[in-house]
């Protein structure tokens, strides 16, 4: 004969079950709110996708050259995953038809590029890939601009500008690596000069911004020192390439500007 459970035990089990259900529900709400991007975080993430398009090209060239600069094959794999994840986050964040359409265009352009990146790099494909990634860069920039515009303040603009410096650091090194790979297309030189001019102009704007704190000023000074190698390279008439040094400088700029962008974003969200 089955023993009858005391009422207090039944009551305790009921309370435990309700508590677990409540905890689960609260956990679901906590996760939902934790995953919701602020507008400054969305600008930051959208801006970072611009950078990824250019770092992908750099890694592609490094793998093609069979260099030992870091681990470009592993980095390339991680970048593909990050682009996928960030695109999904931005689609969840979007609340406008214009941004929805732009993100759909991003996905349509990204999918064939992603398929190309599964194949072994080749010089022939590199030139085409560079053009495809430039188009993807354009739509990623449009995404960032749309989000920054919806912020409707100077803080969003400065987060956008700082984030763009990350992209330009990788654009400069990617175009340089194509040269090191003996892809001497005159258009690449023009694009490199344009990226360097844009980078220098943006740095001056950031240095003069009232949102630039002492901590950010110190990081911008460090970035300026790293950028000096690109300036020296641009002024040199020599055909000698120094991929290791240029890659190191670009990575240093990327890390520092990533921190700067986050600092601007956090400062903006507190004001």
Image: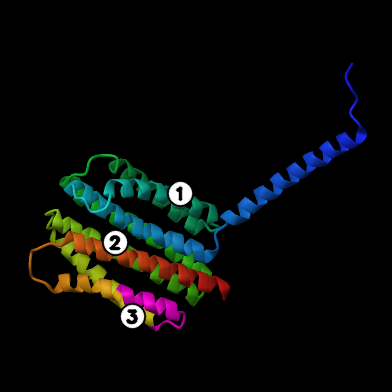
Mark 2 lies on residue:
170
Quarter assignment of residue 229? bottom left
**First along the sequence among labels 3 and 2:** 2
- The answer to whether mark 3 and mark 1 are in CB contact below 8 A is no
Q: Secondary structure at mark 1?
A: helix
* Residue underneath mark 1: 85
Q: Which residues are magenta?
A: 208-223
- Residue drawn at x 85%, y 39% is 12
For the N terminus, which image quadrant?
top right
Which SS does the magenta portion mostly show? helix
Front residue (pair 67, 163): 67
The crowd level at tag 3 (other Cα within 10 Å; few <14, some 14-19, many 20+) is few
- Assess disc 2: are there few (<14), some (14-19) or many (≥20) residues with their C-alpha within 10 Å of its C-alpha: many
Q: Nearer the viewer, residue 95 or 21?
A: 21
- In the picture provided, is 13 more to the left or to the right than 206? right
Please tell me which residue is depicted at 78% across the width and 39% down the height of the picture.
17
Task: State the residue in front, 165 or 251.
Answer: 251
The residue lying toward the viewer, choosing from 169 and 101, is: 169
């Amino acid at each position: 004969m089955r023993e009858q459970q005391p009422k207090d035990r039944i009551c305790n089990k009921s309370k435990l079950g309700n508590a677990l259900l409540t905890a689960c529900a609260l956990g679901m709400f906590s996760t939902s709110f934790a995953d919701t991007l602020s507008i400054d975080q969305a600008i930051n993430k959208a801006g970072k996708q611009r950078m990824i398009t250019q770092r992908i090209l750099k890694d592609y060239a490094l793998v093609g050259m069979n260099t030992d600069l870091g681990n470009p094959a592993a980095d390339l794999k991680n970048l593909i995953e990050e682009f996928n994840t960030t695109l999904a986050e931005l689609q969840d964040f979007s609340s406008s038809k214009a941004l929805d359409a732009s993100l759909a265009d991003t996905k349509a352009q990204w999918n064939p590029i992603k398929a190309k990146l599964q194949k072994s790099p080749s010089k022939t494909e590199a030139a085409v890939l560079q053009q495809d990634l430039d188009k993807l860069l354009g739509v990623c920039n449009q995404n960032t601009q749309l989000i920054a515009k919806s912020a409707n303040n100077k803080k969003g603009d400065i987060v956008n500008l700082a984030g763009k410096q990350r992209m330009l650091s990788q654009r400069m090194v990617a175009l340089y690596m194509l040269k090191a790979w003996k892809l001497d297309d005159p258009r690449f030189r023009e694009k490199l000069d344009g990226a360097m001019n844009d980078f220098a102009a943006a740095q001056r704007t950031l240095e003069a911004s009232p949102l630039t704190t002492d901590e950010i000023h110190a990081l911008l000074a460090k970035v300026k020192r790293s950028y000096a190698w690109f300036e020296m390279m641009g002024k040199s008439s020599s055909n000698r390439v120094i991929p290791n040094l240029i890659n190191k400088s670009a990575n240093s700029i990327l890390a520092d500007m990533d921190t700067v962008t986050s600092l601007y974003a956090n400062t903006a969200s507190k004001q």
